[in-house]
Amino acid sequence: MSIFETLLGHPLTRGLSVDDPRTTLLRREIIQEKSFLRALYCEWYGRIVGALPKKKDVLELGSGAGFFQQFLPSVITSEVFETPGVKLIADACVLPLPNQSLDAIVMTDVFHHIPDVSRFLVEATRCVRPGGRIVMIEPWRTPWSEWVYTHLHSEPFSPEGGWKIPSTGPLSGANGALPWIVFQRDKALFEARNPLWRIKNIEPMMPFSYILSGGVSMRSLMPGWVYRPIRILERALLQRLWAMFALIELERLP
């Protein structure tokens, strides 16, 4: 845990392991009670829904702490362990779904926890119909974000890493740089290994908002009413160069 997290850690989850299902439920409560953070998630969810050309059969990975279902009521919610309100217990690397049964897979801050993304992409290819999507919002590497994730965040951030993450638990295994590794550093390798997928869009964003929100593990640093002006300011300050996150859209080819 960083000094930043030690000083500002949210009291609800202090001392609990991220692998403890109670932490997921408490994070759900934290997102709801922190108006600035809730506004941030509303923006994320709105962007994800807006990137889906078809919204009928959509699977969300890692639904436990969030409220994406409020934006897409028909979504199939899932989590790696039993969680109230979640429809499906599912491992992203072994999806318990029929072939070509989905129009999309969506996720928020989940991809960088998947222990073997090559296996996940094989499963996604099997389950998602041609023309479908994988849409995610994930940490992204810029000089600014690398400094923040390395010095102020407890999860590993290793741009030199590979496509696999050592599994220390259902949620604790992570590499925040993994989305950047797969979709930018190793873009040619991704395309060679996954010829039925193309990277449709990568939009880096949000240099400061998540820090100011305190995320799901720290106290909020800002009231909710300042969210909109801060986002306007971020967009004006070349947010692509200073981004901490990215909206990533993949399209399933015929």
Image (cartoon, rainbow, N blue to C red):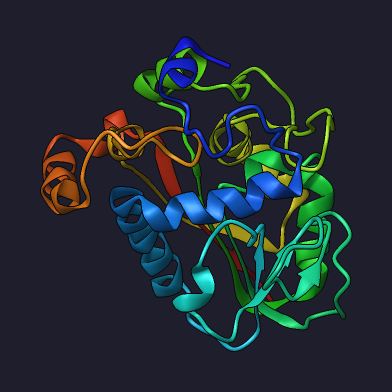
Residue 221 at x, y percent in the picture: 27, 33
Q: As drawn, is 172 to the left or to the right of 143? A: right
When asked about the image quadrant of residue 230, the answer is: top left
Which quarter of the figure has residue 8? top left
Residue sitting at x 46%, y 28%: 141
Residue 132 location (% of width, % of height): 61, 75
What is the number of callouts on the image?
A: 0
Q: Is residue 17 above or below residue 6?
A: below
Q: Check the picture and name the quadrant holding the C terminus.
A: bottom right
Q: In x, y percent, where is residue 107?
A: 59, 58
* Picture residue at 28% right of the left edge, 30% below the top: 241
Q: Quadrant of residue 162?
A: top right
Classify 234 as above or below 181: below
Q: Position of residue 140 (x, y in %)?
A: 47, 35
Q: Nearer the viewer, residue 210 or 143?
A: 210
Picture layout, residue 131 above or below residue 83 = below
The residue at 69%/37% (across/down) is 18
What residue is drawn where x is 63% and y is 34%?
178
Of 49 and 223, nearer the camera is: 223
The quadrant of the image that shows the N terminus is top right
Q: Nearer the viewer, residue 161 or 224?
A: 224
